[in-house]
Amino acid sequence: MPAWFFVSLQGYRIAWLPRDLIAGLMLAAIAIPGQLATARLAGMPPETGLYAFAAGSLAFAAFGANRFMSVAADSTIAPIFAGGLASLTAPGTERYFELAPLLALMVGAILLAIGLFRAGWLATLLSTPVTTGFLAGISIHIIIGELPTLLGIPPPGGHILSRLIHILGHLGDTNPYALALGAGVLIVTLGAASISSKIPGAFFGLLGAGVAVALFNLQSRGVSVLGPLSVALPHLALPPMPDSNEIGHLVPLALVVAMVCIMQTSAVASTFPSEKGRPDDVSRDFAGVGAGSIMTGLIGSFAVDASPPSTAIVVESGGRSQITSITAVALMIALVVLAAKLTAFLPHAALSGILVYIALKIFRLGEMIRIYRQGGWEILVVAASAALVVALPIETGMLLAIALSFVSSLYAVARPYCAELSRVPGSTVWWPPGRGEQSEHEPGVVVFAAGAPLTFTNAQYISDQITAALARSPAPPRLLVIEASGMIAIDYTGSQILQQTIARLKSDSIDVAIARLADERATVEAEQTGLLAILEPGCIFKSVEDAVRQLGPSAKGGAP
């Protein structure tokens, strides 16, 4: 078997097969209702959700690396690309059904390229607060979007706020049967999940809802149903090419969807590694997910992503390899062939109940509370990301949320932690003084530390902080010691700005020394950029204490 093909099955043991088959049964029971619901969320025919599961699972088994990862239609990316495609053409039209597979091909190509170029580091570009915020925004979109179906009222169009106003204005028109079915499925799913994630609550909920529709003829009571599934096998075909206007919309949309896929795939790979204590080849996993989207695009379905809940089911059910996903695909095909007509009794409200459950799951309230308690101002990033996704078209809000992640990261570098250090009494350790802690100061000596690389983004800020620290000194400063352990990199512009500050201080008869410039890369850059050359000979030290003892005013005055 070639090393690049079905690598996740290498070293497979026949003893794993019974556990893989059982886990495959569990995965199918959990995934099938979710795939039908996600297809609805994506604005696509219900069978395309099943196509996406089959194609995504088989393609990842062939090209991915993780043994457990389940790849399928995903409720995180579905509203993103559905909202983007809706700006080009109305959902349910033939062109919409052509653009969705085309977008899947584009997303797949991006992910495949990222995998081939080993660009797994891109997964780190989205911070946890930004990710938590945009997932909350998507959750709100899903819930408001599904409320009309859940209530059995006509679905409105327009902005999310106008849709919410429409819903509130038509609460009196609620269909009690549709609401009972949708709420019942939601309650069963929530209850099953609270007992054990292995219980396929959504499957049992849909089964019960379908039986209720058939027994009580609820279609005559205004309950809309899914209708029978198409059992025709999909065929490989390239979707029609887009025009220039469509390309202008599809390219940024594909990049946004691919970025979310990168983030989620990386999270799944790190949470469920093939072997504990050994990281997976996440770049290969990106390629596997990309291959899944390419395959779904070729069979007329939509983009897929790594699924955290489905992967968790595989692991918790004892699955040991991608045979689990392959088994689930086989069971799904068998079920569709044998029971495709039974979906004629499946109410749309029941699928909405599942989607509301999914929305509640991705609204990470616990994570928000932790960010509020531990992250300080970063809770504002959560709120801003959620507001952008809610207030703007989803793909636009996502792009701005990603930009917000970069801006918040840049701000942390541009305004780094800076501190004046003092000596811990009875030691040679120099440390930022805490509240109520005793500390020692050397008269005329200022020890300053910046906890960040010295770059063009923060050098002026660091220089200004140095000037402010010298101005606060109770005695006229005669020595500045820059504690540089946090300077793990020094660029040319940052070095030039700091050199100008050092030259100004030397003209004011203030000596400058650098201590603990330990990083090899930073040391080389400090020498190359001339930062070390501007200092007097013998002004580079391995510790702050050495610098103070040799260059401090007491040392120059002849004190021991």
Image (tube, helix red, strand yellow):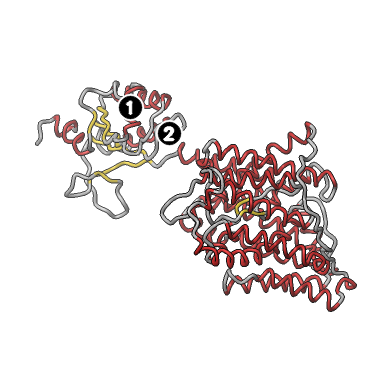
Can you see residue 317? no
Structural distance between the alpha carbons of marks 1 and 2: 23 Å
Q: Amino acid at mark 2?
A: Tyr
User: In screen coordinates, is 437 left or right of 109?
Assistant: left
Picture coordinates of residue 90, whole percent (x, y) = 83, 47
Judging depth in this view, the residue of 307 and 11 nearest the camera is: 11
Residue at the spot 49% in from the left edge and 59% down from the top edge: 13
Picture coordinates of residue 217, whole percent (x, y) = 87, 75
Q: Is residue 271 above or below residue 459?
A: below
User: In screen coordinates, is 28 left or right of 176?
Assistant: left
Judging depth in this view, the residue of 133 and 80 nearest the camera is: 80
Picture coordinates of residue 314, whole percent (x, y) = 56, 62
Can you see residue 240? yes
The quarter of the picture where residue 172 lies is bottom right
Residue located beneath label 2 in the image: 461
Find residue 524 and name its label.
1
* Outermost residue to the bottom: 215
> Going from the N terminus, do you reach mark 1 or mark 2 first?
2
Residue at the spot 41% in from the left edge and 24% down from the top edge: 492
Task: Determine whether label 1 and label 2 are within 8 Å by CB.
Answer: no
* Outermost residue to the right: 220
Badge 2 local density, few (<14 within 10 Å), some, or many (20+)?
some
Q: Is residue 466 above or below residue 62?
A: above
Q: Amino acid at mark 1?
A: Val
Judging depth in this view, the residue of 315 and 406 nearest the camera is: 315
Residue at the spot 80% in from the left edge and 70% down from the top edge: 178
